[in-house]
Image (cartoon, rainbow, N blue to C red):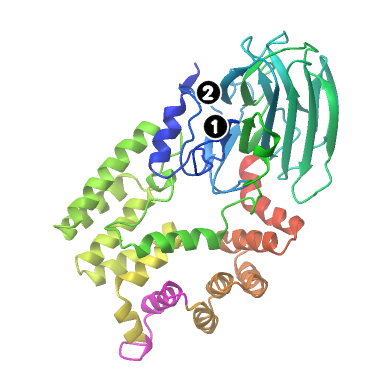
């Protein structure tokens, strides 16, 4: 049976700063729908959109692949499970005038089937006031259904963002369709005056849908959707939707964490629902977990040692919830138990070392001790304090000194991170490549290289490293 989560689901996540739809300010009168799935919900009605989940497929917020901002929506269908995942959105019915539909889409496995549609009160049926616009992938090609006839547009490349803009003339039942490939100014598709799906003039619209395979249930597609905008003015799709990349870059995540940590919260800042070992659809569980975590953080003010024990127990019960482990480290620091904190910091390295907050916790734990070690007032052969000192340098934005220190200690990935943060991605590249010679599957080095090739404008290598870490999980 389908499980339906209405707009309140994303509103709940948005309140925690972990998802939603935003343009930052209140929507303009000519904007009916605008979702960038980032920070806060922009409501456009009492029932803004619904997520239909099935037994095996999903629709969820993700950070690792996005067109702009921090997050996108991932839809994953599973063949022969009796249902399909769907993101379905609503807006006030439009019976006259023009409608503009803008979105970005990336497909992991183009040979599988997906569907995108605009429809009206007759729902997704081939009748008047039913389907007006219908895009479908078939045998690796994107097609559009016009006057009931499927027509091929182009062969879809995996892990490439395509940006679609549609102008729908409602009274005449016709549309213009423009699709661009990321990084290209010249459109792949530039069609004008196309009959709508049923060739029915005055066919009204009030909803849109991103879905897998609806009829045959034979699709294993995984694809991503971002920057969905629907309005009555063509200009709404243009400002504010220039893509800075496909993922939140390492340097962006580090800087965001640095700003949040510098505010000195009692606990490390929450940056994702995944911090609690949950997915974006586990709304009730997230609310409960976050409430428990906040209560324990508040208790830290009066009894940090007891809070450390409580966080340790929560971490044991929820081994994939990294926020509990990091909060335990903060509580141990506040309790003055620096030896136990460093012991746990080392033990948690396999779980946390790719999280920017992990190093920052070590840096703020005892800046003085790390600097005394560097000055020779503590044993010189302590590798944990050496790593703590490296993170102190990053914390102080002394990136070049951190890079030299990491290179001297034989930490190529650490040297690469410091150079990347210093604004020298080309120099960082050599150190990440050295790290991969030591460990070809190192998560940090592979993902950082993907970021670097994006910044260097090398889309082919950027995609190669992205596929290495993400693509094989989706195919």
Q: Is residue 322 magenta?
A: no
Q: Is residue 327 above or below residue 62?
A: below
* Label 1, label 2: how far apart the Cα atoms are: 8 Å
Instruction: Decide which of 387, 225 is in the foreground and name it.
Output: 225
Q: Is residue 467 above or below residue 214?
A: below
Tell me, for residue 59, which label it has, or none: 1
Characterize the local packing of mark 1: few (<14), some (14-19) or many (20 or more) Cα atoms within 10 angstroms.
many
Quarter of the image where one finds residue 419:
bottom right
Characterize the local packing of mark 2: few (<14), some (14-19) or many (20 or more) Cα atoms within 10 angstroms.
many
Q: Is residue 217 visible?
A: no
Q: Are marks 1 and 2 in contact (CB under 8 Å)?
A: yes
Instruction: Decide which of 396, 328 is in the foreground and name it.
Output: 396
Q: Position of residue 84 (x, y in %)?
A: 60, 22
Quarter of the picture holding the C terminus: top right
Magenta stretch, residue numbers: 374-397
Instruction: Decide which of 444, 126 is in the foreground and name it.
Output: 126
Q: Position of residue 375 (x, y in %)?
A: 36, 90
Q: Is residue 39 left or right of residue 473?
A: left
Quickly name the residue at label 2.
Answer: 52
Q: Is residue 335 above or below residue 308?
A: below
Total numbered labels: 2
Quarter of the image where one finds residue 427:
bottom right
Q: Is residue 341 left or right of residue 401?
A: left
Q: Position of residue 471 (x, y in %)?
A: 66, 46
**Mark 1 vs 2, N-terminal side:** 2
Tell me, for residue 355, which label it has, or none: none
**Secondary structure state at the residue bearing disc 1:** strand
Name the residue: 18% across, 59% down.
304
**Secondary structure state at the residue bearing disc 2:** strand
Q: Position of residue 147 (x, y in %)?
A: 83, 15
């Amino acid at each position: 049976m389908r499980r339906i989560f209405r707009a309140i689901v994303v509103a709940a996540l948005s309140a925690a700063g972990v998802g939603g739809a935003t343009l930052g300010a209140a929507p303009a009168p000519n904007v009916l729908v605008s979702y960038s799935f980032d920070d806060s919900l922009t409501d456009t009605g009492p029932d803004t959109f619904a997520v239909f989940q099935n037994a095996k497929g999903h629709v969820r917020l993700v950070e690792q692949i996005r067109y702009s901002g921090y997050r996108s929506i991932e839809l994953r269908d599973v063949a022969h499970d009796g249902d399909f995942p769907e993101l379905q959105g609503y807006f006030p019915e439009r019976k006259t005038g023009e409608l503009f539909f803008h979105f970005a889409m990336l497909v992991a496995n183009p040979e599988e089937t997906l569907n995108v549609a605009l429809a009206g009160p007759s729902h997704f049926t081939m009748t008047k006031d039913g389907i007006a616009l219908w895009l479908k992938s078939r045998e690796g090609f994107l097609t559009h259904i016009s006057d009931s006839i499927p027509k091929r547009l182009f062969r879809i490349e995996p892990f490439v963002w395509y940006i679609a803009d549609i102008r729908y003339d409602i009274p005449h039942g016709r549309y213009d369709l423009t699709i661009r490939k990321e990084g290209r100014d010249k459109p792949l598709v530039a069609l004008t005056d196309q009959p709508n799906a049923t060739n029915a003039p005055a066919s009204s619209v009030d909803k849109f849908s991103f879905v897998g395979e609806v009829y045959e249930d034979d699709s294993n597609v995984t694809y991503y959707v971002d920057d969905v905008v629907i309005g009555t003015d063509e200009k709404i799709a243009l400002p504010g939707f220039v893509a800075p990349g496909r993922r939140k870059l390492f340097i962006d995540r580090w800087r965001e964490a640095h700003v949040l940590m510098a505010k000195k919260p009692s606990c490390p800042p929450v940056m994702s629902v995944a911090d609690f070992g949950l997915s974006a659809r586990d709304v009730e569980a997230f609310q409960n977990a976050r409430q428990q975590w906040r209560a324990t953080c508040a208790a830290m003010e009066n009894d940090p040692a007891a809070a450390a024990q409580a966080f340790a127990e929560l971490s044991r019960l929820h081994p994939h919830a990294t926020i509990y482990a990091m909060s335990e480290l903060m509580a141990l620091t506040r309790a003055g138990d620096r030896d136990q904190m460093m012991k746990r910091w080392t033990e948690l390295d396999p779980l946390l070392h790719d999280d920017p907050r992990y190093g920052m916790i070590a840096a703020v734990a005892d800046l003085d001790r790390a600097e005394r070690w560097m000055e020779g007032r503590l044993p010189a052969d302590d590798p944990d304090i050496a790593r703590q000192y490296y993170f102190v340098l990053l914390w102080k934005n002394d990136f070049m000194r951190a890079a030299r220190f990491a290179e001297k200690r034989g930490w190529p990935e650490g040297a690469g991170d410091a150079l990347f943060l210093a604004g020298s991605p080309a120099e960082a590249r050599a150190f990440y490549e050295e790290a991969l010679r030591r460990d070809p599957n190192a998560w940090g080095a592979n993902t950082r290289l993907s970021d670097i090739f994006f910044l260097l404008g090398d889309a082919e290598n950027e995609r190669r490293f992205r596929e290495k870490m993400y693509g094989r999980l989706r195919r």
